[in-house]
Amino acid sequence: RFFTQGLVDRIAHARRHLATFLGADPDGAALVGNTTTGVAVVLQSLGLRPGDEILSTDHGYGAVGLSIQRECRRTGAESRVLPIPLEATDEQVVEAVREALRPGRTRLLVVDQITSATARLFPVAAIAATAREQGVPVLVDAAHVPGMLSATVAGVGADFWVGNLHKWAYAPRGTAVLVVAPQW
């Protein structure tokens, strides 16, 4: 009966509570197995073609980079990795992203909110605003954010945001949330 009676309602109930916890729109939130899965869902939803590119930074998580490469091989799109010096200021990071974006060609910018390797906090709200000015959608890899930062998903302003709940929100493994902006 657990699987046949009321499962959809229970999932919707959990999704609403998790979206509230994260400061996200419940209608744009979906439960996914982990951040890497959420990234793959976004990548496969873009309809990439040859000539398109996905821009990421050299601070990205390895599995996310592999997902980007896989989708680019599958579609003929290009992956470009922007080097960001570890000692770069927030302003320098935003400026580097601004200069690297190619409106009309860059179909997605992928950026970590907190980097896995160094725990660097990126200024994702400012990065998202800069990308939005140029018409480039942003995917924020927030794997380490839920439960660690009080920042809300809505405050980031990204088109896509995905975070694991099994780290600092202490949920079971295999619990993550993908948040998608209404226009998507």
Image: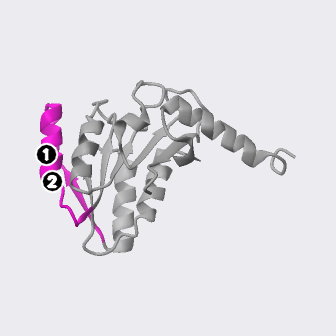
As rendered, which of 181 and 83 lies closer to the eye? 181
* Residue 32 appears in the figure: no
Give the percent coordinates (x, y) of residue 83.
17, 47
Give the percent coordinates (x, y) of residue 28.
52, 48
Where residue 54 sits, quadrant-wise, is bottom left
On the image, numbered disc 2 is attached to which residue? 100
Q: Please give the name of the residue rendered at 22% of the width and 66% of the height, measured from the top-left corner.
A: 104
Give the percent coordinates (x, y) of residue 147.
48, 26
Give the total number of marks visible in the rendering. 2
On screen, 46 above or below 37? below
As rendered, which of 30 and 77 lies closer to the eye? 30
The residue stretch that appears in magenta:
77-106
Residue 23 in magenta stretch: no
Contact between labelled residues 1 and 2, with CB atoms less than 8 Å apart: yes
Where residue 88 sits, quadrant-wise, is top left
Secondary structure beneath dot 2 equals helix
On the image, numbered disc 1 is attached to which residue? 96
Q: Residues within 10 Å of mark 2 (few under 14, many from 20)?
A: some
On screen, 71 above or below 62? below
